[in-house]
């Protein structure tokens, strides 16, 4: 293979990738829609610079990277590049006073006005913003557009982690992962051409303020929120302090009109709830161990945390309503073909081998209900995390039965196990009592910029690369195109797969079928 082909397949990041690579990224390779791939034997060690390694049957192409300039920068505020804020000065990377890295995070793929776009919020740096990558644009200087970096009052936006498309309101919903009053949900209106109608994102106070990360819309117009906010440290880990929420709007077409925020409550066999007060008093509770035991199942119900239009502390409200906290759940998706009756969410856990607490390695849970607005359901662990599969974070269905889950274990865990992050395919079929088959489809590497940040940076930029933004979509912006409404068919010419290699060079990749097999 030639040098360019090797770069695309192995995922060697770098700002030298330009027009030719951009042109190659504009279309999806056609291959089998079954996501039938090989596996990567092991994770990359945490040593020096490492290439990304994809499973046989997969290839990847960079569609954006941190040093790409914005087509319409907010120069006065330093919002000038896809992955950098340059207001403090300094070079873009690998310098003791390098620019702030903004960490483009989760991805939303939409086809609007006949063009193919990828949208992201930015998680790092002194302020947040929203960008749009035009996948059809081959000119690097025009490829990434700044959509918003201020709120409705003109104030700087907070940094964003989660993002989704709400076809009922025709808005991007973005989540700020922070404690009350900073965290919460913001909405950015898009027109039919993929442009921001006002250029400003508006806060949605009725959805509350909390450490929201995951956000999804269901077929009934409800907004599901998954919170990632650690509790007090104990036993080498942290107490459960994060909730799974469902917002039921008064008007599905206008989220400013108020509604009811509900939080998930898990019940013991005797019908009593597992509450925040109980788990805070006993973070080594047998209830937590049971929640992380393969083959268990728990009845659930939704409890009202708050109703109205004003801003409130969602985390405190959920605790007061006796909802059940988890060990840092992060993201969730609906299983295709389930009629929005199966919601899968990840739990990151303590991301430390030093933790003596049950559930320290997190996992993946399935909430099964009669429908998206049902009041009761059942919760079961699908994957119980361990040392080799932990820090589970982003999540997306590749097919009806194959769930893509990626790690964000963090520098500490990387060092403890001498292994960088991986992406896995989980087969969700079969008996919950049996261990799931996990196939490693990605062994993430570490680029030179991330190595620098892990060993030499001033501390305001993160270290090792992180996998985020795993996203499988056909880009349909209608209600019938909601994620979970249709059965995905990756690489069929419409369904496309993306992920972002956060930190370091901050490269966003499109994964395709490797047609050279």
Image (cartoon, helix red, strand yellow):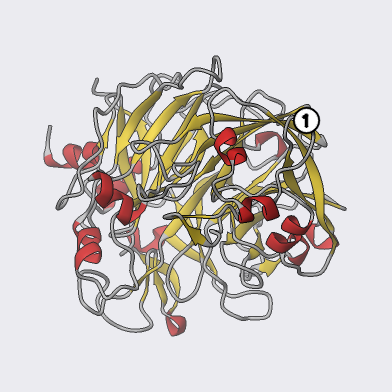
Q: Secondary structure at mark 1?
A: loop
Looking at the picture, tell me which residue is in the foreground, 396 or 21.
396
Counting labels gives 1
Looking at the picture, tell me which residue is in the foreground, 202 or 435.
435
Left or right of 471 in this view: 57: left
Q: Is residue 261 above or below residue 152?
A: above
Left or right of 37 in this view: 259: right
Q: Which residue is mark 1?
A: 371
Q: Is residue 1 above or below residue 144?
A: above
Residue found at the very far left of the displayed protein: 2
Spot occupied by residue 288 in the image (x, y as percentages of width and height): 58, 41
- Crowding near the residue tagged with mark 1, few <14, some 14–19, many ≥20 C-alpha atoms within 10 Å: some
Looking at the picture, tell me which residue is in the foreground, 342 or 110.
342
Left or right of 339 in this view: 50: left
Spot occupied by residue 62 in the image (x, y as percentages of width and height): 32, 47
**Who's the residue at 71% across and 63% down the image?**
316
Residue found at the very far top of the displayed protein: 430
Q: Quarter of the image containing the N terminus?
A: top left
Spot occupied by residue 332 in the image (x, y as percentages of width and height): 59, 41
Q: Quarter of the image containing the C terminus?
A: top left
**Who's the residue at 57% across and 22% down the image?**
295
Q: Is residue 511 above or below residue 486?
A: below
Q: Is residue 477 above or below residue 146?
A: above
Q: Is residue 398 in view from this perspective?
A: no
Left or right of 101 in this view: 166: right
Spot occupied by residue 60 in the image (x, y as percentages of width and height): 31, 38
Q: Is residue 392 in view from this perspective?
A: yes
């Amino acid at each position: 293979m030639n040098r360019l082909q090797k770069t695309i397949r192995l995922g060697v990041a770098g700002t030298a990738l330009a027009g030719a690579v951009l042109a190659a990224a504009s279309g999806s390779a056609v291959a089998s829609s079954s996501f039938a791939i090989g596996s990567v034997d092991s994770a990359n060690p945490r040593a020096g610079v490492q290439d990304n390694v994809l499973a046989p049957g997969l290839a990847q192409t960079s569609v954006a990277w941190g040093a790409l300039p914005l087509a319409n920068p907010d120069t006065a505020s330093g919002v000038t590049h896809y992955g950098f804020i340059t207001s403090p000065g300094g070079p873009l990377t690998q310098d003791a006073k390098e620019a702030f890295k903004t960490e483009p995070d989760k991805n939303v793929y939409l086809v609007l006005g006949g063009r193919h776009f990828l949208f992201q919020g930015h998680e790092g740096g002194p302020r947040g913003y929203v960008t749009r990558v035009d996948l059809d644009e081959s000119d690097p200087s025009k490829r990434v557009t700044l959509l918003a970096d201020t709120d409705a009052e003109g104030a700087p936006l907070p940094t964003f982690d989660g993002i989704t498309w709400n076809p009922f309101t025709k808005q991007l919903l973005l989540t700020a992962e922070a404690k009350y009053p900073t965290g919460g949900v913001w909405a950015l209106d898009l027109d039919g051409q993929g442009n921001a109608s006002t250029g400003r994102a508006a806060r949605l106070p009725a959805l509350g303020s909390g450490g929201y990360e995951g956000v999804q819309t269901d077929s009934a117009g409800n907004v599901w929120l998954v919170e990632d906010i650690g509790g007090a440290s104990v036993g080498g880990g942290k107490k459960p302090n994060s909730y799974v929420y469902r917002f039921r709007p008064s008007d599905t077409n206008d989220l400013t009109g108020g509604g009811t925020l509900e939080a998930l409550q898990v019940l013991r066999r005797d019908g009593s709830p597992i509450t925040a007060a109980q788990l805070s008093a006993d973070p080594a509770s047998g209830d937590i161990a049971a929640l992380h035991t393969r083959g268990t199942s728990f009845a659930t119900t939704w409890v009202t945390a708050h109703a109205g239009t004003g801003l409130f502390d969602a985390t405190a409200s959920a605790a007061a309503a006796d909802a059940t906290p988890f060990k840092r759940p992060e993201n969730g998706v609906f299983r295709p073909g389930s009629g929005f009756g199966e919601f899968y969410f990840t739990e990151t856990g303590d991301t430390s081998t030093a933790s003596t607490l049950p559930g320290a390695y997190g996992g993946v849970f399935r909430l099964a209900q009669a429908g998206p607005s049902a009041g009761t359901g059942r919760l079961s662990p699908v994957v119980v995390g361990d040392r080799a599969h932990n820090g589970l974070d982003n999540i997306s269905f590749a097919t009806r039965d194959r769930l893509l889950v990626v790690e964000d274990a963090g520098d500490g865990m990387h060092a403890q196990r001498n292994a960088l992050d991986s992406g896995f395919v989980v087969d969700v079929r079969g008996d919950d009592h049996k261990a799931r088959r996990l196939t490693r489809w990605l062994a993430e590497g570490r680029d030179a910029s991330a190595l620098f940040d892990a060993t030499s940076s001033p501390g305001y930029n993160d270290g090792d690369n992180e996998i985020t933004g795993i996203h499988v979509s056909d880009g349909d912006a209608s209600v019938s195109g909601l994620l979970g409404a249709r059965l995905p068919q990756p690489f069929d010419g419409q369904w496309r797969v993306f992920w972002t290699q956060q930190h370091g060079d901050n490269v966003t990749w499109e994964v395709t079928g490797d047609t050279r097999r």
